[in-house]
Amino acid sequence: MDIQIQSIGVVSAIRPNAEDDFWGGEESCIMLSDQFESEALLGLSEFSHIEVIFLFHEVDPGKIVFGARHPRNNLEWPKVGIFAQRGKNRPNRIGSTICRLIRVQGKQLFVSELDAIDGTPIIDIKPVMAEFLPRQEISQPKWSHEIMNAYWLKKS
């Protein structure tokens, strides 16, 4: 099945290239596309967090992983399927992050800790509601905690 999705906006950020770590405290701006009016964001400022779905637009299609690999190519971590990790070299190149909404200004959303680079196309924006977060305790393997060790630290 062929699916077509249009970008609803674009990210303006400090980072021009994808990096594995140190996304903590970074602020960026999402600007809605011309097809939208500011009223598309009406009421969103009442939420503290939003989920941003975006396209890893800089990923070389030849580097997409369809099977398994060691996360970050680190042989100390187990080889796991692409759907058991959050790497950018994934089929469809779709990323998703929950980030803090700082403010809404016209057609712009100012956010904190969105791990997307400058020029990233935005596919969708959703308010974060507690009722959609996990209702049970989350479990994950040890390596996944290790990989995230420096992810949300501030860049020094």
Image (cartoon, grey):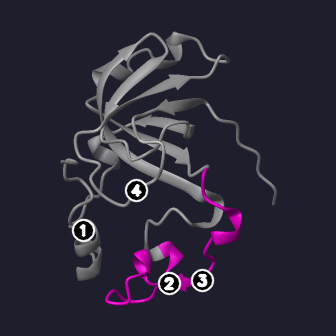
Disc 3 crowd rating (10 Å Cα; few below 14, some 14-19, many 20+) is: few
In the rendered structure, find residue 9 and report the number of the disc placed on it: none
- Three-letter residue code for mark 2: Arg
Q: Position of residue 97 (x, y in %)?
A: 39, 48
Q: On the rendered structure, is 25 left or right of 16?
A: left
Q: Is residue 75 magenta?
A: yes
Residue position for label 3: 67
User: Which element carries disc 4, helix, strand or loop?
Assistant: loop
Q: Nearest the camera: 122 or 116? A: 116
Q: Position of residue 62 (x, y in %)?
A: 70, 69
Residue position for label 4: 19
- Three-letter residue code for mark 1: Ile
User: Which element carries disc 2, helix, strand or loop?
Assistant: strand
Q: Distance between the residues labelled 1 and 4?
A: 26 Å
Residue position for label 1: 138
Q: Are marks 3 and 4 in contact (CB under 8 Å)?
A: no
Q: Do the residues labelled 3 and 2 touch (CB within 8 Å)?
A: yes
- Three-letter residue code for mark 4: Glu
| Image depth: mark 3 or mark 4 in front | 4
Residue 139 visible, this angle:
no
User: Which element carries disc 1, helix, strand or loop?
Assistant: loop
The disc, 2 or 4, on the residue closer to the chain's N-terminal end is 4
The disc, 1 or 2, on the residue closer to the chain's N-terminal end is 2
Q: On the rendered structure, is 133 left or right of 3?
A: left
Specify the segment rendered in magenta: 58-83
Could you tell me which quadrant the N terminus lies in? Answer: bottom right
User: Which element carries disc 3, helix, strand or loop?
Assistant: loop
**Residue at horizontal 30 percent and vertical 41 percent from the top:** 113
Q: On the rendered structure, is 90 left or right of 108?
A: right
Q: Nearest the camera: 130 or 103? A: 103
